Amino acid sequence: MQHKNRPAAYRLALTTMAAALAMGWQVSANAAASSTPSIQHYASSGSDNQNWILPAKTYDNQRYVKLDQVTASNVGELKPVWSFKISDNGPIESPAVIWHGTAYITSAHDHVYAVDVKTGALKWEFKDNPHVISFAANRGVALLDGKVYLATLDGHLIALDANTGKTVWDKVEVSDTANSFYTMDPMPYHNPTTGKTELLLGVSNGDWGGIGNISAFDPETGKRLWKFQTIPGPGQPGHDTWSGDSWKRGGAAVWAPMALDVKDGVLYANAGNPQPDFNGAVRKGSNLYSDSLLAIDIHGAKPKMLWYHQFIGNDTHDWDPVMPPILFNGKVGDKTMHLVADGDKAGNFWLLDADNGKVVNHLRVSMQYGQNTAPTLKGNVACPNTNGGVEFNGGAYDPETNMLYLPTSNECGFWRSTRNVTYIAGQFYLGGAFPKFVGPNTGQLNAIDVGTGVFAWRDHDALPMAGGALATSTGLVFTGKLDGQFEAVDAKTGKSLWSYQTGAPIIAAPVAFEQDGQEMIAVASGPAGNQQLPDQPKAKETVLTMFALKR
């Protein structure tokens, strides 16, 4: 309206300039989208063989790929293409994220490396030196609309330029940096109700006296959109499961990647152990929603819990569920069901009805002993140890075999509690001490038949196993071991078909994708971190190794 009296030539010039600017903005937006996935790519990640953009391939965490080049007959010819040395030496629990020829890998101390998939050459590195409360672990980054998102050990959420690694914005998002931090990767999600794209992120504060939560952030600005607390406050259902004011430092941290049913907008998240870890007497009750799988409706403007299933009430051994929950439609007997699989550090495997949380199947997958006795002042033995059972990378589901493949560990510990428990900011809030190792220290790769609820096979190993599993449509299962061996086994029998010594313990899950028509498989290895055994030599290097068949 402002231009109606302007000369026609002037109006034409303005229109041309506006069109040019709009085209420029569109080009810029397209360039940003091409350097990373857009939100639309996440919903179709299962059918995208050229990339691997979520920690376990898809929102449902099945960690299954439909690639046909590497088979049981030729996997023995798999060779390393290159090995990239990660300068920040430390335990690597995160899988590589792959997008159009670039692999993004994070280090233990929140460094980010962008690596050329073809050559293994470094494109850029983002160096961070966060304050570490106790241990260093990072479980990956998120890619979206030209940015790389990193959640850090000192409670920051950082957006980086995907082409350069330069910081776009950096915000402290935890409420208390003395007891709260991040170890998981942010999860991009489009909320159809609000029309907003969100980054979903759980806070890690178990063992330090904080309260767990899941928050949604605006990926453009870092602004918090909503927050869901995993410990119920006064007046909320479940609050009466905590004695006195013990809920105020109750824990229930959210450590690991979550699963998401995009169609129904249901988020499946594991809430961690209660605090203080080893003294349940000061927090009498079942301590909801610690040690629980939570199903949360996130389609609305505010999250709403649909159901929960608590695996252990009043846990006194730090036996929380920490693996990424696995969503799938599987056949149980002669009935197809919507299921969610989970596991805990107490050595239990759980198969639940994803619609209501009811138990469909329960298997003991690790050696268990003394689980009904709390730690005493003098001390006692219980199994597994805090780093035993089912660990952070969990397993994979193969729809062809209807089996779940799950690495697990057998470890025992000698536990002690303390009579008095005092919260000191920035220190462990344990009510005891982390247990000392008591043998044995072994592991196994389990194939669990969903149809029958029992083991199809078990491949035992001399060391604990925490490296996660990858299943392929050609009937292979890949997994890493604590001695550095990267192995492929037959999905139906568990027979070992190939292995390669990476030179360092593997506690990260492998990924598979296509690059220029060639199937590639990548896995990271390095120091064992929390999985380090007392008599095990410490690794001196951290590497990302890329494998392929020779052309």
Image (cartoon, rainbow, N blue to C red):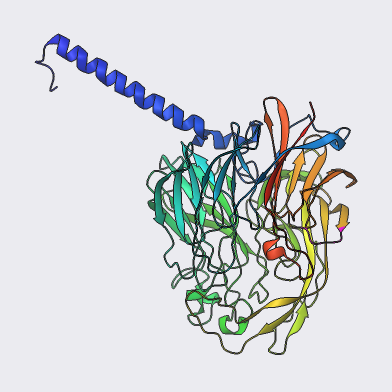
Which percent across, then down, holds residue 332?
Answer: 78, 48
Q: Position of residue 71 (x, y in %)?
A: 83, 33
137 to 287, vertically: above or below: above
Task: Note whether 100 is above or below 285 in the view shown.
Answer: above
Q: Residue furthest top?
A: 9
Q: Is residue 402 among what the camera can see?
A: no
Residue 431, quarter of picture: bottom right
The image position of residue 298, as x and y in percent, is: 49, 50
Q: Residue at x 58, y 81 (%)?
A: 284
* Secondary structure mostly taken by the magenta-highlighted segment of the chain: loop
Q: Is residue 471 left or right of residue 160?
A: right
Residue at screen point 87% across, 54% down: 458
Q: Could you say which quadrant of the image residue 392 lies in?
A: bottom right
Closest to the observer, 411 or 187: 411
- Corner quadrant of residue 88: bottom right
Q: What's drawn in magenta, residue-wise?
A: 461-465
The quarter of the image holding the N terminus is top left
Asked whether, in this view, residue 345 is left or right of residue 42, the answer is right
Horizontally, is 543 left or right of 74 in the view?
Answer: left
Q: Is residue 146 magenta?
A: no
Quadrant where the C terminus sits is top right
